[in-house]
Image: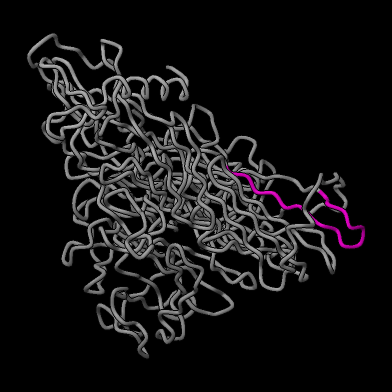
Amino acid sequence: MSPPGLRLLILSLALGAAACSNDAGLGGNGSPCSTSSQCSSGVCTTGACVGGAAADGGPSGGTDGAVAIHDDAGPTRTLVRVVVDPGTATLVSTDGARATQTFTAMVEYSDGTTQVATPRWTSSTLVAGDIGNGTGIFTANGFSGGVVRIRATVLQGATEIFGEATLTVRLERTVITAGTDPTAPTRFIGTAMIDPTRAADIAYPIDGAVMPQNVYPADIQWRNGAAGDIFRVRLSKPSVQVTAFVAYDGSNHWLADEPAWRRFAQTDPDVAATIEVTRWDAATQQLVDGRTISLKFARAALSGTIYYWDIAAGRIVRIDDGTATRNQFMPNPQEGCVGCHSVSASGRYMAGRFGGGENYGGVLDLTKDLTGAPPPTEYPANAGSIHWWFSSWAPDETPGRARMVVTTDENASRQLQLVDPFAGTYVTPAAGTLPSNATHPAWAPDNSAIAYVGDLDAWGGGNTQGSVYTVPVTAADSFGAPVRVNDGSAVPNPMPAGTADSYPTWTPDAQRIVFAHGSSSRSENGAAALYIVGRDGTGLKRLDNASGGPAADNTFQPRMSPFDQGGYFWVSYLSRRDYGNATAGTAGTNRQQIWISAIKKNPAPGEDASEIGYWLPGQNPASMNISAFWAPKACRPDGESCMVASECCGGDCRPDANGNPVCAPGPGALCKEIGEACTSAADCCDGVTCSAVGICGDF
């Protein structure tokens, strides 16, 4: 390809030699075109006409006509190529500004002549902005960055010929927090020294963590600091950089502001991100370099609600996705509390027992107002109602067919029983029996089996022995013979040592089971880590990353989410590990909190399928929290507010006319552009494939 300067010189010479005007048939230089040529777009052309039918620009570009060439009197010349200028460019959007970049195109013909084109302009993705109305002007939306391919298309007969350019849209944002000297950036000029004893050592996020794109902004926490210090927190990817200046206030943390975090999470989704904290030491007037950590945002949005027990509040609370607000949606439950709750597969219903110990249970519709005293239940729940302890829902929630499996008499027989959750009655199996000396039931999402823990030596809240079993579901209310999937007394080289399996939970495809194993199921003072095993008992593997490392022994109560996104399943669990530092987090308290890890759908044989986890935002760090259940939310329709494209049914989240990010239609009903969600190659434009993670690939 010719250098831009040379291309422009060739273009100007060509236009100078053949310039014309349609004015009274005279050429623009005072000479008419020859009889074998005509004036078109200010150029005398021979044996061809330029212009013609308009081409539909499609949803990712303008609708101006593409250049068309067809036979005319005299020799025919052909279009050789289309050249876009500039061929590469970088566009910087600062603090959300809608910056622009102008592109031009020219066509080169087989006879060596060139001509300015009026092509159809399109862009490979709408995520970072749009090139519209046939102008060649790309406008960044200021919401997401990344690499965009710009295409100029012209027609030669029925054939489209195009040229391309590469545009990198880079986002930059600077934040000076309240109480920080506005001149703080001037202190960070020069090279920082290395001194680990004084460095602002990052305590959270954990190096190597994997998060979904819609996770609430992380509270970035570090150690070391003194009065007068200023910290520069920098979040970086190739196409985005967020820089915050934070004055020391004793807490050593910065809760990333939401606009900055969203840009950081959504831009370059397949590239590792880095976070670094540099300290300006007021006592020595020196810059001290800090450790850089990395993390990854999966192309996933865990949309919905987590319901968990906040022990300090004495209530089940909920946190909606993308927020950090604890909502006490049921302030006045019967008997003062709802214990050992479970949530149905759709997220609509919650079951639990009222009061302490094994007590009478009830079912609540989470779409109703539950602020009453007491809240309404689906059947009259009182001291004479059926009793249970732990419970799990069958996938079918249709009244009349819906079932739960519960444990009863946890202090003696520990019997699994069927329950009709809308009638409030036990159901006798139509065939087969449910086992005794069993606890922690978990109904498979495909309705094929129920997992549970057997071989117990105590109730499920403190067993020190146990093995994972499944009992097949052979038909409605019918069961086969139990099968032991993992022998808790024979785990090879267990870490920590122990013989207690607990809390099995199914992956969404019902092919694997995650469970805790260790000395006890008791999360407050036992020792355990997470393991995974195939439903047939093969492939047992300790999940070191999710458990906090190969020697960690403080991780309990795994519970799979219903989400299958970004090439991962996602699991919540309890852990007494440190969250952050001692001032803004839980460091040194041994206080259990809820964490979340990604689980690879297709790990290599023998590979640890888990990723390093992240702390569930919105919890009360001063409380001990347990028993997290996920209530999913459907994808968001066009026009509904969003934070990342993964949340949207159309696979696109971008600013509306007012600059507020909303779910937007994809590139039309027929196809999806590069970077947008898909289910098969047929969804994608221009023959692009649908990748393994459900995103239309590259050109």
- Nearer to the camera, 133 or 278: 133
Q: Residue 347, image x and y in percent?
A: 32, 64
Per the rendered image, the range of residues in magenta is: 273-288
- Nearer to the camera, 371 or 552: 371
Q: Is residue 224 above or below residue 308?
A: above
Q: Residue sitting at 17 percent across and 61 percent down?
A: 401
Q: Residue 474, image x and y in percent?
A: 22, 46
Left or right position of 625 against 438: right
Left or right position of 260 against 507: right
Hey, which residue is sitting farthest bottom in the picture? Answer: 373
- Nearer to the camera, 355 or 670: 670
Q: Look at the image and say whether residue 280 sits in the magenta stretch.
A: yes
Q: Look at the image and say whether residue 17 sits in the magenta stretch.
A: no
Residue 470 visible somewhere in the drawing: no
Determine which quarter of the picture holds residue 689.
top left
Hey, which residue is sitting farthest front in the picture? Answer: 30
Q: Residue 149, image x and y in percent?
A: 38, 33
Residue 131 visible somewhere in the drawing: yes
